[in-house]
Amino acid sequence: MKVLCDREKLFAAFQIASVVAPARSPKPILRNVKFEVGGQGAEGHGTLMATDLEVGVRVTLADVQVEAPGSAILPIDRFGSILRESSDAQLRIESDGQGTLVRGDRSEFKLPAANPDEFPAIAEFNEAKYHSLPARLLKELIRRTVFATDTESSRYALGGVLLEMNDDKITAVGTDGRRLAMMEGPGKAVGGHQTGDTMTIVPTKAMHFIERALSDGDAEVQVATRSNDVLIKSPRVTIYSRLVEGRFPKWRDVFPRRSDAVKIELVVGPLHSAVRQAAIVTNEESRGVDFIFGDGKVVLSGRAAEMGQSRVELPIAYDGASIAITLDPRYVNDFLKVLDPEKTFTLEIKDSESAAVGLTDDGYGYVIMPLARDRRDV
């Protein structure tokens, strides 16, 4: 293999791929990135690949000058350091099976070579059935749901985000049993792609990586689900992930259908600030914050032994009967911080013992279970 690469573009692609490679593995070959080039001259193309056997990625590298096609195994730490520390605009990479030579205008590095044939194959996207949707939407679906997953629980399949896809819509759901986040948006089915009754639960780790690897500049992405895995393809990257095994809770049953619930319009930023302030005096033993709505305001109060007390007032557009609920401020903050501060949302509450529901006008819903409330004075 002989190739001339733009160092900055190679570095950017290498950083994406190297995130997947495990820091420790019984298979040493996995602690590397495989670099494969094909074509000839300015028409050449390159692909960087990495996997931990659960998640795999192929990153396309443009603007490569290929003198001889082939592949090389690049160690994460040493090759990454070369790319980061070098000041050369271009780097020439040569590998012959005996070693890998990396040369710049004023630098040269010789690295030991592993056999590229020992590197596991990384799935390519060759699906005829898939969903097409904007990359920005997929990133938002992940950002607004992945935080609610539970990677430590053995109950149900809570360690991932459930994806449901039909003709014109994609829905993402994450829950840890104490709160549930759901967002839906438009997605076009190609070739009759549907998830149907299949539990397409993408692991939390993979979802974080997908969000990071996709760029807002990627116009469209393609998502194909299969019985045991999922494939995501953008113009720059193809990502493979195995699915979480097990049954996801019947999440639609969690969203209450209440005609008697109180609906209160709130602005994200001011409420987020008030919640953070009220939570200052809470601790693990007394984490709840009381929310009392009424008389054109919401009063938030926290209290913990040896920590003190807090009381924060926030004017709101609600003059109805007083209603109180105690919520975990961590879960409230998780919801608020994925929304734009200037936006408004609707909070639906019924009483101190029923779930609170936050709803936005762009298809996002959040259910949070209340805490036992043993004090009602503020």
Image (cartoon, rainbow, N blue to C red):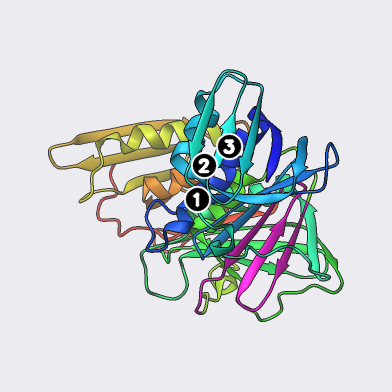
| Residue 349 can be seen in this image | no
Task: Tell me, yes or no, whether the two marked residues, 3 and 1, touch with CB atoms within 8 Å.
Answer: no
- Which segment did they paint magenta? 221-246
Task: Please give the name of the residue rendered at 42% of the width and 58% of the height, measured from the top-left corner.
Answer: 28
Alpha carbon separation for disc pair 1 and 2: 39 Å
Along the viewing direction, whichever of 152 and 373 lies nearer the viewer: 152
* Front label number (3 vs 2): 2
Residue matched to label 3: 317
Q: Is residue 205 magenta?
A: no
* Vertical relation: 269 (above or below) 18: above
Q: Residues within 10 Å of mark 1 (few under 14, many from 20)?
A: many
Say which amino acid is labelled 1: Asn
Residue 281 placement (x, y as % from top left):
25, 36
Alpha carbon separation for disc pair 3 and 2: 18 Å
Q: Secondary structure at mark 1?
A: strand
Task: Tell me, yes or no, whether the two marked residues, 1 and 2, touch with CB atoms within 8 Å.
Answer: no
Q: Secondary structure at mark 2?
A: helix
* Vertical relation: 16 (above or below) 123: above
Alpha carbon separation for disc pair 3 and 1: 57 Å
The quadrant in which residue 44 appears is top right
Q: Secondary structure at mark 3?
A: loop
Task: Please give the name of the residue rendered at 51% of the width and 71% of the height, measured from the top-left corner.
Answer: 244
Looking at the image, is mark 3 or mark 1 earlier in the sequence? 1
Task: Please give the name of the residue rendered at 36% of the width and 64% of the height, measured from the top-left corner.
Answer: 152
Residue matched to label 1: 32
Q: Residues within 10 Å of mark 2 (few under 14, many from 20)?
A: many
Q: Quadrant of the C terminus?
A: top left
Say which amino acid is labelled 2: Leu
Question: Is 67 placed left or right of 358 in the picture?
Answer: right
| Residue 22 can be seen in this image | yes
* Front label number (3 vs 1): 1
Residue matched to label 2: 336
